[in-house]
Amino acid sequence: MNSHDPFTLALSLILSGDPGLFGIIHLSLQVSLSAVFVASLIGLPLGAAIALFRFPGRGLVITLLNALMGLPPVVAGLLVYLSLSRAGPLGQFGLLFTPTAMVIAQTLLVLPIIAALTRQAIEDLWEEYREQLQSLGSGRVRAIPTLLWDARITLITAILAGFGRASAEVGAVLIVGGNIEGVTRVMTTAIALETSKGDLPLALALGLVLLALVAAVNATAYLLGQASRRHMQ
Amino acid sequence: MSGLPAVAVQDPLLELRNVTFVRSGKVLLDRSHLVLAPHGRTVIIGPNGAGKSLLMRIAHGLLEPSTGAIVCRHNGAGAPRQAMVFQRPVLLRRSTIANVTHALALRGVPRRLRRSQAEQALARFGLDHLSHRPARILSGGEQQRLALARAWALDPDILFLDEPSSALDPAATKAVEDAVNVFHSRGTKIVMTTHDLGQARRLADEVVFMCCGRILEHTPAASFFENPATGAAATFLRGELVLDPHEPPTLPSTKG
Amino acid sequence: MRYFHRLPSLAALVLLIAASSAQVTAETPFITLASTTSTEQSGLFRHIVPEFTARTGIDVRVVAVGTGQAFAIGRRGDADALLVHHRAGEDEFVAEGYGTERRDVMYNDFVLVGPRADPAGVAEAGSIQEALAKIAESESAFASRGDDSGTHRKELQLWGMADVDPAGQWYRQLGSGMGPTLNTAAAMDAYVLTDRATWLSFRNRQNLIILFEGDESLFNPYGSIPLNPERFEWVKADLAQQWHEWLVGEEGQAAIAEYHIDGEPLFFPMSESAAGRVE
């Protein structure tokens, strides 16, 4: 295609305002942010609950949760594919090869990270706060939002880790999305495609754009954090 | 049974009846009986490992005794309100005033009243100029005063304090003792442990002396310090190491 | 918690981004076509699908995977039609009742590509079988896709015809698509069997050139198969049928013939009379 160096190529791609590229960027953000959102909605209270309550098999649950942080994306994709396929148990919803399927698969990948890290953080905090909170009349359930808010710095880092995982993976979204141009093609699958076509400079340029994207999201989170801290003084 | 007060108490506020606490086969608290009156400053003293903090936590309801009962009664309506201040203040990662409003929220105070009540409590303890600082960056003394202000906002009938000033310098310690007296003058019952005998002398109206998991004495302060009934107490007051925890303590033979 | 109020607006922003996807899908009627990576990567669909959509208003969403996976998708009823290039597999698919019928659409050919120096002397071979035999004898490096794709199945068929069982250090099974296999072959200076379409659009040739082509056995026919609505009741049978007929009809065939890269056509349309039959 061209022999530009990847950096120049990346820059010209962004500045060109190519609608195809921006469509892909938009979809990538949509899918990963949605997955992180849903995973947080479930994972934060789930992690807190596991931290605070004793139940039979608790140790096993914690070990499993930690292990699932390393769930290979392609395996997650395969499981979701088999479930959403027409021949599978959830086939009637016709979700295969749609962005929704991609969000589901990525949520599966991000949820263990958020839940496991939340569990650890909340367990440590509860250790420190338990007596005082009990003295003030807060039972475990009532303490959950208090502890989650108190651990917010650590939890936001966990959420950003989840976002990193989601936006970096290609195995899951490739299988359940099908990499359909204009419909389910995201940055990572586009990079994989261009690599397999042999257009390595373009693939690398897209990679740089993706890195810039993820850095931008992290920078936004950091600045918001700084702003709120200053607000408190 | 140990721990009978020298004087019978009318309408006791808090009673521990035949309370024991066993953990991992060890008896940490042995058949303790305690009756506390609704007002006044009760100071619990004794050597390390005597079970003072344990007794307080059981009295406050943070721990379940292995046997026995805690009876906490208000003449008039309902269960008495309680609050506790710990040796190291436990504060949330939020502003000074938010720590107080959080406690008020837990108590069920309606949202529109929380702020003003919190501000009053902070002002009472000289913390209002710090109300929007993150609580965690306050000094040790300020943090402990915040813990006390938080307790104040809850208007407790009993205030438990577990070695509240042992981590503080003398100036901060004085501030804590002044605060305790502020509670006392409002009529709050004070139950406090300390290893500082000087502090005990300054604050106590009555003394509970514990040793080896038992309450050995429960007497008015003046008579305790002048003329302790037990040999263990006498040894302790002299500042000497108290006897081997496995030996049974000397029981009072005569009562003054 | 005075900054609590910022959280809802942040959440709203995230939801807005998420929700804005809802409009993209669903309004245009579409079919899902399972096809192969080599076909998609040639760029063919970008050329012919817009013409089909302009004619019928139907969009075609192409899921491009290896031939084996395309059949698997078809067997699960996850697509509405197939466009693949493995005659035996296609016939079986229809015979087993997953598809309604199979029609010839187009063909391209495979070429044998290898290092300029040609250590096995493949360029002098009289037939593809001879060329492959020479490679095996000289134990020159050969990169195989090894992924149960149409190309891979073709390659194995040709080894069979050459009476060679490829095994040994020189025969590298990569388990990947055509593009990555070419990448690896270029890096290894190995021989590789590839479809012409992928080769024409492949940018990373390094030392590789076409060394052998034109043998009839190298022809690579493509078949279109609509999925059987009696087997899969949810299939968009009507839309898929329109695609199927357009593809083999005058317009589709012309669109296919028109598609060139650097002046070279990639695919050759099958007409009904042409001998598109390949064993």
Image: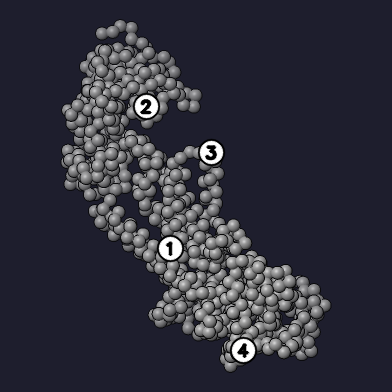
Residue C110 in view of the camera: no
Residue assigned mark 2:
B58
Q: Residue furthest top?
A: B254
Q: Earlier in the sequence, mark 3 or mark 1?
A: 1
Please state which of residues A197 and C116 is positioned toward the viewer in this rendering.
A197
The C terminus of chain C is located in which quarter?
A: bottom right
Q: CA distance from mark 4 to mark 1?
A: 46 Å
Say left or right for C17 vs B186: right
Type of amino acid under label 1 = Leu
Q: Amino acid at mark 4?
A: Glu
Numbered disc 4: what chain?
Answer: C
Q: Please rate how many residues cluster around mark 3, counting C-alpha atoms within 10 Å: few if below 14, some from 14 to 19, many from 20.
A: few
Instruction: Categorize mark 4 by other alpha carbons within 10 Å: few (<14), some (14-19), many (20+).
Output: few
Q: CA distance from mark 4 to mark 3?
A: 69 Å
Q: Would residue A127 appear left or right of C48 to someone viewing this image?
A: left
> Residue under circle 1?
A33
Asked which secondary structure carries label 3, the reply is loop
Residue B16 lies in quadrant: top left
SS at mark 4 in the image: helix
Label 1 Cα neighbours within 10 Å, binned few <14 / some 14-19 / many ≥20: many
Q: Please give the residue where the numbered disc 3 appears in the rendered image.
A: A56
SS under mark 2: helix
The percent position of residue B130, horizontal first and vertical second, equals 20, 47
Which amino acid, mark 2?
Answer: Ile
